[in-house]
Amino acid sequence: MVKKIIIVVLALVVILGAAFVYLNNRNRTMSPPGEASLTNGDLTVSVTYSRPSVRGRLIFGTKEQGALQPYGAYWRLGANEATEITFNKKVNFNGQAVEAGTYSMFAIPEVGGFEIILNSETGYWGAFEPDHAKDFLKTKVAAQSNATSVEQYTISTLPMEQGVNVLFEWSDLRWSIPVTVQ
């Protein structure tokens, strides 16, 4: 009898393990990892994120419209894990001072733009809001319409004088954040 119980328990562990691996890989396939990094002079800015696709959905809008990322709701700037940004030195992030290091980056979509939040804790997974006590920077950026719709969420790093411009594009919107040497 004990042997049968052990066999059943081991079978359940194997089945649950296989289900976990399948679901984890399925999410990563649907929203694969992305990275954007650029060194301009002695400044390096790197961003790691996951790349969801539009797949016929309304991305930004109201809850009533059924938007994937409703106005006023926290967003991890991607899928799976929260987007993280790394600076190799002290910078101005959209004009605000930030020490060198790695930070989680979140956004709150608004009509015509985004509120961008940097949080000192890293390693967030899932669509959970971060510990707001660790939010240390909030800044607003304007969004522009894209000439063509971008199916898969994309973050790019582009050189600019004295720094790096971090460009975000998804669906019919694009917005950017200047990161300059302090």
Image (spheres, grey):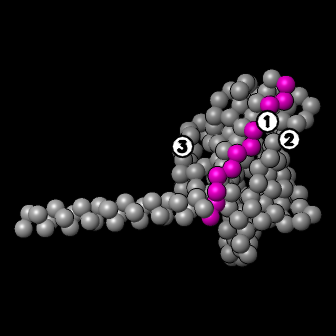
> Which residue: 66% across, 44% down?
48
Asked if the residues shown at circle 1 and circle 2 are in contact, with their CB atoms under 8 angstroms apart, the answer is yes
Q: Which residue position holds label 1? A: 38
The x and y percentages for residue 156 are 80, 47
Judge by depth and name the residue closer to the eye, 172 or 158. 158
Q: Earlier in the sequence, mark 1 or mark 2?
A: 1
Q: Which mark is residue 158?
A: 2
Question: Is residue 38 shown in magenta?
Answer: yes
Q: Quadrant of the C terminus?
A: top right
Disc 3 and disc 1: Cα gap in Å?
A: 22 Å
Name the amino acid type tagged 2: Leu
Disc 3 and disc 2: Cα gap in Å?
A: 26 Å
Q: Main secondary structure of the magenta part?
A: strand
> Which residue: 7% across, 68% down?
1
Q: Which mark is residue 138?
A: none
Disc 1 and disc 2: Cα gap in Å?
A: 7 Å
Q: Earlier in the sequence, mark 3 or mark 1?
A: 1
Q: Is residue 44 left or right of residue 158?
A: left
Q: Which residue position holds label 3? A: 123
Question: Eyeballing the image, is 119 above or below 7?
Answer: above
Local secondary structure at mark 3: loop
For the question of whether residue 16 can be seen, the reply is yes
- Highlighted range, magenta: 30-41
Single out the mark in the foreground, 3 or 2. Answer: 2
Local secondary structure at mark 1: strand
Name the amino acid type tagged 1: Leu
Q: Is residue 160 left or right of residue 72?
A: right
Q: Is residue 47 left or right of residue 129?
A: right
Q: Quadrant of residue 64?
A: bottom right
Q: Quadrant of residue 67?
A: bottom right
For the question of whether residue 70 can be seen, the reply is no
